[in-house]
Image: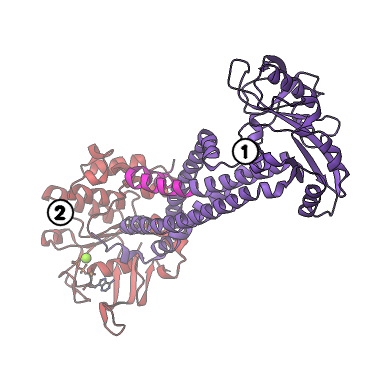
Amino acid sequence: MEVIAQQIRKEFIRAGSQTNIFTAVAPCDFLIPAGQVTMIHGRSGSGKSTMLNLLAGILHPTEGKVFYDGADLYAMKDEELSGFRNRHIGYVPQGRSAVFSLNVLENVMLPYTLYEEDGRNAARRMLERFGIADLSEVMPDRLSGGELRRMAIARALVRKPEVIFADEPTGDLDDENTEAVLDSLCQLAREGAAVLIVTHEEDAFAYADRIFAMNAGTLSQER
Amino acid sequence: MQIFRKLPLLNILRKPVRSAILLCLTAVLSFTVFGGALMVSSLRSGMTSLKERLGADIMVIPEEAAEKKNLEEIVLQGQTGYFYMEDTVTKAVADVEGTKQVSDQIFLASLAASCCSAKVQLIGFDPETDFTVLPWIRRSCSGQLKKMEVVVGHDIVSDEGDTLTFYGTDCIVAGKLTRTGTSYDHCVFAGADTIRELTMSSIGKNLNQFKEVDPNHVVSCVLVQAEEGIEIDALAERIQASVPGVCAVPTSGMIAGISGNLLGISHIVRIMTAVILILAFLIMMIVFTMLINERKREYALLRVVGVSRVSLRRSVMSEILLICLAGAAAGICAALLVEILFAGALQGTLDMPMLMPGAGSVISYMLSAALTVVAAGILSSFWNVNRVSSGEIGLALRQER
Ligand SMILES: Nc1ncnc2c1ncn2[C@@H]1O[C@H](COP(=O)(O)OP(=O)(O)OP(=O)(O)O)[C@@H](O)[C@H]1O
Ligand SMILES: [Mg+2]
């Protein structure tokens, strides 16, 4: 599945006054092709996460449209869009993310079970791949930052989504786990997924097919 | 079960302390609403029951007894006592214009001594003319009372077929009356001739205060039912004017004090319920706001993996409703338990008749208590639930990474 953003722009109204408008993402066209790994890097606060959210259908752009294989994402009704996210999009949020009342395995199964499919086996495989199989029954608040992150990645990938967004997925991982995560993302791209990764680590660029830089809301291609 | 569906329950179990606080809060609310309604309604039915038992519009008693408030003591406070006047009074009262039915009763009090089974109030009615006790007796037990047969009030520890001894004379218990919630539950009833016989025994044993009376020619009180449309107070005055040595007490006046108390208590209960409702509502609002804000990022995450706005709202609401329903149930059970265990003590403390209302009313009070709690839960969280479920996911996700 291919993602195309057309002239998307995002503005935020900053503290207090309605006139203090801040452009987090300047108008741009952007394509995430299927079967490739695209990376965005840039300074903190440059608008990378905002861009990712716009593309993933969880932040309405001030202007512009996002198409998934021609389907206008933000024209969908909430019910439809939620189902679409569940089936087609894997999203690894920046920072820690867990449903704290569920154990690790249940957290990873969650996207599957939402729509009445049992993803237990798929979830177990994911946990194994990221080296946290022995933590299945553990509650998330007992996990280290890196373990939580791997759980979040496992959850994003468990349904083999066709489009994957990962916001600094290797931020708190050691080299070995970084490699495992990036390998998995690449493999999914090889299998046809469109993969977009936000990262700070230059080592990761080796895995990228294309690299973009984000600078104060403006996107520019580097490779 | 599907993981997302059991999430509300898991969330509750995961935060046991907070859940317990919320449970207590909602329980207190339902306890107050249900318990208060039950209490006011019990008092109200007690009052109705007392009116029904009194049955008469006016009670005519000897002047001295009226001065000493003997009748009120017996009827309202459940003490024992007796007093006499000539039985010609009955005829004289019946002759007063405006009386429709007239029936006399004779009282006797037994003693807590070896001669008697228990210290109780004995009331003898005239089976020929009675219009207050007999209808009640017929409702509780069938058949006619033979001589030396008595029926006992609900709270007297004797059953049909038992023998009770008063002043050395044995009586057979022919039946037990239904509960009224009034002092009549501690009385023993019999035909006037039986009571006269017992009075004789008491005099014979030198245990009667009135040594000189001839039990066969005295009565203790004359019950009067007024004709339709007759003003009760005026009739009472007329009786008092035309029959010497008696006092005619309108029964409505006797229970006026009780209805005043009842009004006061209903007021207090109503105010208390309102205060607790407002307090509980505010606390619930704070706690639910905290609960929801704390989980904002978690909710956003659920939305990211594909939970729709509607499903999320349903899930959060379910959690709140679960707590409310559990709390409501706990509060109702507690109130029922208190009612069952302490109704007697409460009745004693308030010194008012109390009678549990019928199952239908009790159930309707339960439902309205549960409904109040659920409504408070929904109203106090509605805005927050709405805000969090329809907010922009990308923004909520930024919180507390
Ligand atoms: N809701 C908002 N209201 C106002 N400003 C916002 C809002 N969300 C983001 N911003 C601003 O938009 C800019 C871009 O934020 P964004 O999170 O996209 O940066 P980022 O490139 O992901 O940074 P980092 O590498 O630190 O994660 C920041 O300057 C931020 O302050
Ligand atoms: Mg970011």
User: What kind of residue is marked 1?
Assistant: Glu
Left or right? Give the position of B246 relative to A137.
right
The percent coordinates of residue B286 (x first, y second) are 36, 59
Where does the magenta region start and end? B1-30
Left or right? Give the position of B243 relative to B291.
right
Q: Residue at x 68, y 42 (%)?
A: B66
The percent coordinates of residue B58 (x first, y second) are 76, 45
**Which disc is residue A172 wearing?**
2
Instruction: Please give the chain letter of the residue carrying mark 2.
Output: A
Q: Considering depth in this image, is B240 or B13 the residue closer to the camera?
A: B240
Q: Considering depth in this image, is B180 or B276 the residue closer to the camera?
A: B180
The percent coordinates of residue B351 (x first, y second) are 56, 41
Left or right? Give the position of B256 relative to B190.
left
Q: Considering depth in this image, is B47 or A93 the residue closer to the camera?
A: B47
Local secondary structure at mark 1: helix
In the figure, the shade used to draw chain B is purple
Q: From mark 1 to mark 2, how far is it between C-alphas?
A: 84 Å
Cβ of mark 2 under 8 A from ligand 1: no
Q: Residue at x 77, y 37 (%)?
A: B132
Work out which residue is located at the far front of the displayed protein and give it: B212
The percent coordinates of residue B31 (x first, y second) are 49, 45
Residue A118 visible (yes or no): yes
Identify by letter the chain in red.
Answer: A
Q: Per the image, is B4 magenta?
A: yes
Question: Magenta region's main secondary structure?
Answer: helix
Instruction: Please give the chain letter of the residue carrying mark 1.
Output: B
Local secondary structure at mark 2: loop
**Which disc is residue B341 wearing?**
none
**Which disc is residue B73 wearing?**
1
User: What kind of residue is marked 2?
Assistant: Asp
Residue B366 visible (yes or no): no
